[in-house]
Amino acid sequence: MKKDWCLGLGILVLFACILWCLTVAFRFPYLGLYVDLNGQREWEITDIDRQGSASKLNIQVGDKIELIDGRPPGDSLVVQKWRTVEQARELVITRDGQRLSFAIVKDGILAYDVVPLIGSLTSLFMSALLITRVRQSPSARLLSLVFLACGLIWASQGASVRGDALGKFLIANFMMALQILFLHFLLVFFKEKGSFSLPLGFMKYLYAVLFAGFLIRILYFIPPWAYFAYLTHNPLTLTFFVFGFVLNISLLGYLYVRHRQEKTYFASILRSVWVCLFISFAPFICFTVLPKLIGNVQVAQSEYTSIFILFFPLCFAYLIMSDQLYDIGNVLRRLLFAIAMAVIPCGVLTGLYATIFPDDLHLQHLVFLFAASVGLVALVLYSAEYFTPRLERLVFPRRHALQASLKKMSRRLEQISSFGELKDVLLTDIVSTLEIAGAAIVFQYPDAVETVAEGAIDPGEIEQLLASSALMNHPGYTCLEINRHEEYASYMILTRKKTNMRLVEEELQWLRLITTYLAVSMENLHLTRKLTLRLQQLASRLPAEQEAPDIQWFRKLMFELQETERIRIASDLHDTTMQDLFFLKRRFAALLEKVALNPDEQAHVNNIINFVELIHVNLRQSCFELNPSMLNDIGLVATVRMWLDQEAYHSPFQIEFITENTAVIEQVDILKKKHIFRIIQEWLNNAKKHSQASRVTFKMEAADHVFCLLYEDDGVGFDDQVVEPREHNRSGIGMEQLKGRVHFLHGKMELKASPGEGVKYRVTLPV
């Protein structure tokens, strides 16, 4: 909490500093007049910057400053501190005994106003993006500080050249800090991404130099000492800036030479970062800083060479956007799209402003209006995507209701196991959501029609209209085709709303999306039902007697195929998904040790780890059920007991397991053990689905060369004289397989059941 409070206070202070510097830059013109005291103790003009507003006036080197805004020049703090004339609106000078007066007009200067504004906005945006999106990464936090320093340098440039003490204080401190922060970022980034570690101990000495420079520059705010501190410390600032640049270029060059042959992420990023750093700062250092340090001259003006520094944030924006540094490229692409969308309307707005107010036209005003409007509109467009889903319930309640219903239905479609369930799972929700009188799903076969209806809708009328092909254009119904192939066609039919209104386009689009989901589910359902019917027909034709050797090969083949597929699935789950979950858990655990998180974030990560562990345990249990390999290791009885103990935690009834004469049971071969285990599995699955029992008992016993397996529950039961045993399972496949296993083992199965008195199965096998 204290850390967040300090961070918020720091951001507030920096924002106030930036606002102050921009206010100074936009409020006062840049004059570019340099003065000094002559032998007569008069303030004489010694130099004039041709980029300043004073170069456009009839002011010459050697003129004496008489008054600045009606006051003697010695009273101006800017003159006292920096020996320059700035932040002035009116000047009075004397030349050859003649007194001249000049009014200073504010005019935008590209080099000191427009370019710094663009540079500061770009750098500060990159800093904010990193600290909000990748704040858990130490290197990302350092890179955000690099961009923050870069943005503050740009933002304070206009105020610095206008003689503002805070502007000079900020630009000097952050110029010293920029290269050192970038060096720190490189060391941490390469350790984080490339597993390449360099010592960080020397960084504390560099930061100590930065802190010492910070303390010395406090003299900028004390008029008697400001000029002396500026003259002596400005060369040190530039020297330290060059020193930091050389360190970074040397480090990147050394690492590139060492790793250039490696085809790794670490090697590929080295060249990009080196080129970015060199292009950004080399022109400024080589043509402006070094000539000034060596011979107090400038080969090229800083306002031109500093433009190359704009390449620094833009290059890193590209690297981040292409996911070469951090995976936030999608965010950047969305923002760039929002900016592109905002450029044209904002350009039109700026043009209208220039047309309507030509007398107040200033380049600086136009640039500010265009940049501010583009930023504001882009922010609104980007934020709309974020806030619209959260405000959808209030702003678009109908759309929110449709989307919520769509999510609910899509989840429930997974549970459908028969066409009859469509009414409860789908149609009821459609009728209530759309507020219509009724809805139906019609299946049209070559020789029959099947209708599932809900609400006030007449299935007979629907079938007649469908047969006469008059349903599609009927004014009282909305008809959507779901799917069509050679065996059947299906349609969704909806009545008008209860208010007698037809469905609107938004609701129709929602319905089309529902039918897309429904088409896939119904096709799978149709294929499943067809396959089930064929399996049931085949199972009903199989002889039930043990003395059917001609069909034993078929049963043996089917069981072998099932076991092979179960083993394959269990092996795939163990070798892929379970291993992935294991490594995912380890990575989250390593994240907790490596990254400092607040208590809420740490609790959230712990919950994720626990959830991953739960999935891992469930998958391990599923693998065991698919391939009970422990039958070989600990035997049938111990495996069944362990499995039933685990299932007891998830079953709605109490499970009891009884064994007698287990030594004889363990003498059966592994094939019989697997079949017995599968029989117990099927019984337990049926009990969970249909028994509604409070107690289920399994018993194993062996005597006189006969193995006996019993199942008993106290559930709802059924009438075994009326209902086929296989109907105890809805599909019948499970019970048919159970009977097939018993017959395959040359055993017998007896069933006793009655309504309200539970179910009893008894299987006997020769051993």
Image (cartoon, rainbow, N blue to C red):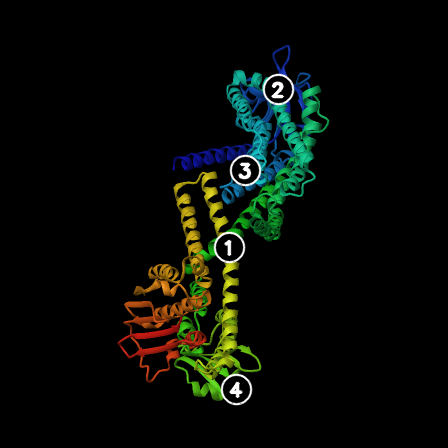
Q: Is residue 659 left or right of residue 108?
A: left
Query: Circle 1 is placed at which residue position?
Result: 385
Query: Circle 3 is placed at which residue position?
Result: 139
Q: CA distance from mark 3 to mark 1?
A: 29 Å
Q: Badges 3 and 1: C-beta atoms under 8 Å apart?
A: no
Q: Residues within 10 Å of mark 2 (few under 14, many from 20)?
A: many
Looking at the rendered image, the quarter that the N terminus falls into is top left
Q: Residue furthest front?
A: 704
Query: Circle 2 is placed at which residue position?
Result: 65
Residue shown at the point (47%, 54%) measured from the top left = 387
- The vertical placement of 373 against 664, above or below, is above
Q: Badges 2 and 3: C-beta atoms under 8 Å apart?
A: no
Q: Badges 3 and 4: C-beta atoms under 8 Å apart?
A: no
Question: Circle 1 sits in a helix, a strand or a loop, which is it?
Answer: helix
**Is residue 52 something one can see in this rendering?**
no
User: Which marked residue is nearer to the observer: mark 3 or mark 1?
Assistant: 3
Q: CA distance from mark 3 to mark 4?
A: 68 Å
Q: Residue 35: horizontal and vertical position, in percent? A: 63, 19
Query: Circle 4 is placed at which residue position?
Result: 470
Between disc 3 and disc 4, whose residue precedes? Answer: 3
**Residue 675 marker:** none
